[in-house]
Image (spheres, helix red, strand yellow):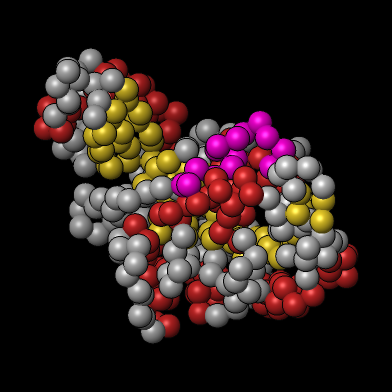
Amino acid sequence: MRNPDRQRILEALGKLDLPDGGDPVSAGMVKGLSLDGGDVRFALEIGDPARASAMEPLRRAAEATVAALPGVVSVRVALTAERAPAASRRSAPPHSASGAEAGGNGMAGVARIIAVASGKGGVGKSTTAVNLALALAESGLRTGLLDADVYGPSLPRMLDIARKPASLDGKTMEPLEKHGLKLMSIGFMIGENDPVVWRGLMVMSALRQMLNDVNWGMLDVLVVDMPPGTGDAQLTLAQTVTLSGAVIVSTPQDIALLDARRGLNMFRKVNVPVLGIIENMSYFACPRCGERADIFGHGGARAEADKLGCPFLGEIPLHLDIRAAGDAGLPVVAAAPDGSHARAYRDIAGRIRDTLFPRS
């Protein structure tokens, strides 16, 4: 079967009528059109989130129109509102199980922004961030994931992505998508072995661009995987957008907890709420005999959370399956959603969700 043609798709969409006259193609509403074999994906930019209900018939019509074209196997059309005016940025996202407010934090259409951080490297922060984002998306939240580690981006490898983001207008990038997540990383734009030799100002500029010059659309939560430490990237993030909270990842050992404490206090200093601490590599579970060993100690993060007066979100074991899944580009929440490790991430994600979106 012949694959669908981009021009034919646009011609078909150009025959649809907008409620106030014109068509979606001439109005510049069609964004991020991508063709993967017979699978077609694109967004309709509606400008104001408050128009989502009124524009839903147009979305369905666009989906049906494209689905009827030769060679089309599947179609997914989303409504986005990246240019929402200031007066409408407090409207609730049309989807949202949370009923959350969108915008008001420096990113129109994004209801909540959280940072996943650590005081030092090597504690499994990126693995934690990816699996938490997957678990949040699985819970029904529209979720984005930004890899803010410019010097050591890991998202391309962890999600097995080797393509570059598109830009329809030469100014705004379209996030990549996988497993229901919208994704952006500097690693999508450079080779895996290419070093990033940039000064602090360039890093800060790149981070601002990945926040503001990406068509994130309507999200309930954007998860930001921070680089380790308490440097330029952390300060830039706190100054560019209003964070709903930070999650601190640490191992149980004393030296990691010392650095985690610094990271936690840094967020408090810039008035970012700390949602809690996760103890990663909490214990080793032998894959053969099931015996448990506390290689890095155990319970240190829980004790530190109590001492610092912040929530303890849970513990994740040191296990071969978690490491192997991440290295293979299919994180464990996606690879084994019914397993005990996925449940551990899901439980933590549930606590974060309940804090971000309290139930009335």
Left or right of 316? Residue 89 is left
| Corner quadrant of residue 79 | top left
Q: In the picture shown, does residue 151 fall above or below 219? A: below
Left or right of 2? Residue 322 is right
Is residue 290 something that shows in the picture? yes
Which residue is depicted at the point 82% across and 60% down?
294
Return the x and y of residue 137 as percentages of the image width and height: 56, 39
Is residue 84 something that shows in the picture? no
Which residue is depicted at the point 26% across and 34% down?
36
* Residue range corresponding to the magenta coloring: 328-341
Name the quadrant of the C terminus: top right
Return the x and y of residue 4 as percentages of the image width and height: 17, 26
Which residue is depicted at the point 30% across and 64% down?
190
Residue 263 shown in magenta: no
Which residue is depicted at the point 32% across and 70% down?
194
Left or right of 236? Residue 131 is right
